[in-house]
Amino acid sequence: MPYLLGIEIGETTVAAALCRRSAPPRGRAPQSAAETAWGPAEPVTLGAAAAVVATSLALSPGGDLVASDGTAGAAAQRASGFLHRIGGDTAVRLAGEPVRPETLLAGMVGWVAGRLWQLQGRAPDRIAVAHPTGWGPYRLGLVRAALEEIGLGDPALVPRAGAVVTGFQAAGRLPATGAALLVLRLGGAGLEISLIHPHATGQYEFITSVWCADLAGSVLDAADPAGQRAVLRAAVDLAVRTAAACAFEAAEVAAVLLAGSAAGHPLLTDLLAQAFPAPVLQLGDPRLTVACGAALALRPRTRLAETATGPALPEYPTAEAPLVTAMEPLPPGPVGAMPPPRPPVRVTEAPAGRR
């Protein structure tokens, strides 16, 4: 069955989701628009037993870039922490060789596409890759070139915050006012805060986006309860200051949308509710929100417009949108890559200058 694939390559973890197209009974043409509609987002289990895998790559004996769980083998044989090096002048070393970070991102996307090939028995009709919201045309150009080099065609590049808004919009969870939304993604390596104006057509207008590496899920995990409260308080204060810098009072924010591996902390919701007199919303597992929204963003825009006024799609995972997984889990650690072919890994000079 045709499907669309959404991928988030995060700083520390990688998540994916797919969206399937419903089909009429075999042997007859569709009788209504509903019979050719795309269904809800379905999260995918990428690891042997976990929905996400580490943003870590290793070289297989055959020279393929494959996902690594970050534990097997020497650290020098793995590459991680490459997302925010894209656009800089420092390469990442893998097996003793410098590799451009955008090549590693493309390799991670290729591995995920191959994983879905294993699970679904066919390639996705189209792929969307969610990227940090604040990235500009220079970084995106590097990513597009690297993805084209791997042979993945022209995947859609979707800002993280836009993917979050799309997911909430498809689920019928957004306020009807159309006012500004605050998207807070708290991941393992940092905090991303974005302000967005949504539109009923499935489009959105970015107001601003900020990134703070000092407020991260890893810092939260290492802190005691008092330290955790301090970290989360600082995150909420940054959200308030970000809105104020754009001339938005807290009362003018229609909703706060949460995503990221650390966004499920119950104290974060309480602190945000105290700072913003608006709903603080979460969809399913916050680690998967961006990937699910990226898959949904690939649907024809007319479908997005119809779901804005029609029946709400279910939250994921549900009986209608189950967690997609393999019948037989793959072994942990590096696993064999599937088509598309591996990206070239070669030594190149990383250009300095524009970001």
Image (spheres, rainbow, N blue to C red):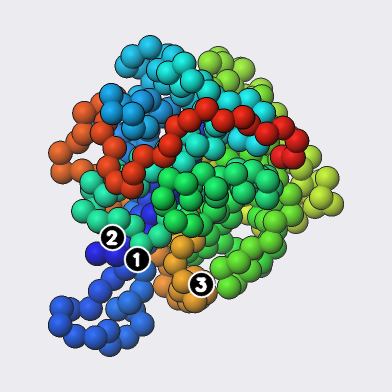
Residue flagged by tag 2: what amino acid is it?
A: Glu
Tell which circle, 2 or 1, labels the residue nearer the N-terminal end. 1
Estimate the spatial distance between the alpha carbons at disc 3 and disc 2, rounded to whole Å.
22 Å
Tell me which corner region of the image, top left, top right, bottom left or bottom right, holds residue 212.
Answer: top right
- Residue at 66 percent of width and 66 percent of height: 178
Residue 320: mark in rendering = 2
Residue matched to label 1: 39
Estimate the spatial distance between the alpha carbons at disc 2 and disc 1, rounded to whole Å.
9 Å
Q: Would you call the spot at circle 1 few (<14 residues within 10 Å), some (14-19), or many (20 or more)?
A: some
Tell which circle, 3 or 1, labels the residue nearer the N-terminal end. 1
Estimate the spatial distance between the alpha carbons at disc 3 and disc 1, rounded to whole Å.
14 Å
Instruction: Answer above or below: position of 16 versus 81.
Output: below
- Residue at 25 percent of width and 74 percent of height: 23
Q: Would you call the spot at circle 2 few (<14 residues within 10 Å), some (14-19), or many (20 or more)?
A: some
Callout 1: SS: strand
Residue flagged by tag 3: what amino acid is it?
A: Arg
Q: Is residue 209 left or right of residue 93?
A: right
Q: Is residue 304 left or right of residue 138?
A: left
Residue flagged by tag 1: what amino acid is it?
A: Gly
In this orientation, does residue 289 appear? no
Task: Give the quadrant of the N terminus.
Answer: bottom left
- Residue at 33 percent of width and 14 percent of height: 73
The mark closer to the camera, 3 or 2, is 3
Tell me which corner region of the image, top left, top right, bottom left or bottom right, holds residue 27.
Answer: bottom left
Depth check, front residue: 229 or 126: 126
Q: Would you call the spot at circle 3 few (<14 residues within 10 Å), some (14-19), or many (20 or more)?
A: few
Instruction: Answer above or below: position of 23 versus 225.
Output: below
In this orientation, does residue 134 appear? yes
The mark closer to the camera, 3 or 1, is 3
Residue matched to label 3: 301
The x and y percentages for residue 276 are: 69, 46
